[in-house]
Amino acid sequence: MKRSILSLFILFLGIQVSAQKFFFVDAQYILENSQEYVEAKAELDAASERWQKTIEAKYKSIDEMVRNYEAEKILLTEDMRQKRLDDIKKKEEEVRKYQKEKFGVNGELFKNREEAVKPIQDKIYKEIERIAVAGNYAVVFDRSVSSNVLYANNRYDKTEEVLRKLGIKTENE
């Protein structure tokens, strides 16, 4: 009996010794409070808005071409009608190509966002890594992307510490 109690005690002690330390941060909150990120996002939003206005203007021009074609269609020869339709299709293809170049998966907006935001994210992640290594933490969770975290005690939240070490002021300060 004493032996089984002693075995349980040693097993329990072993579990406690091997317990891993962890913490979590809200990387999105840190990013959104970074002045560098706010400025980069403003630049990206401005470029996006300019491109969107250009696209809208091009579509407006195409709509005008279509209205003119419809109004003059009965007066045009078959060759002239076909040429106008071809011109409209060509303009539509140009706009779609431009839209894809700017907003597509590998478009300019995506590339610019990656160029502008990645260095900021890297800086944040390096600081998180420094805190983890210095505190001998085994795991770090990102609360902003982890939708399966149902509850987290704020005692383990190091978001404010990361913000302080990066010199980022929040609205609360």
Image (cartoon, helix red, strand yellow):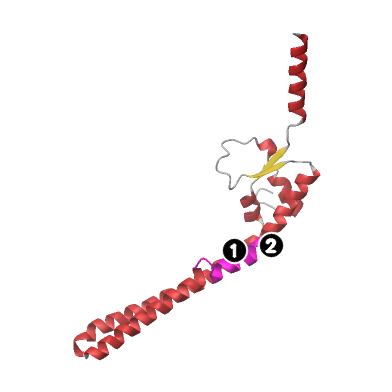
* Relative horizontal placement of residue 94, taking residue 86 as reference (left or right): right
The kind of residue on which mark 2 rests is Pro
Q: Residues within 10 Å of mark 1 (few under 14, many from 20)?
A: some
Q: Residue furthest right?
A: 134
Tell me the residue at 49%/68% (across/down): 104
The residue drawn where x is 73% and y is 41% is 138
Q: Mark 1 — residue?
A: 41
Q: Which residue is mark 2?
A: 119
Residue 41 part of the magenta segment: no
Q: Is residue 130 visible?
A: yes
Identify which residue, 97 or 167, lies in the foreground.
97
Q: CA distance from mark 1 to mark 2?
A: 13 Å
Residues shaded magenta = 104-118
Q: Quadrant of the N terminus?
A: top right
* Residue 106 highlighted magenta (yes or no): yes
Q: Looking at this rendering, what residue extends furthest in the top direction? A: 1
> Dot 2, how many residues are within 10 Å of its Cα: few (below 14), some (14-19), or many (20+)?
few
Residue 18, quarter of the rendered image: top right
Q: Give the vertical position of 108 relative to 80 (above or below).
A: above
Quick one: 86 or 109, which is closer to the camera? 86
Please, what is the three-letter code of the amino acid marked with disc 1? Lys
Q: Quadrant of residue 110?
A: bottom right
* Percent x, y of residue 93: 40, 77
* Circle 1: element type: helix
**From what the image shows, is residue 52 above or below residue 64?**
above
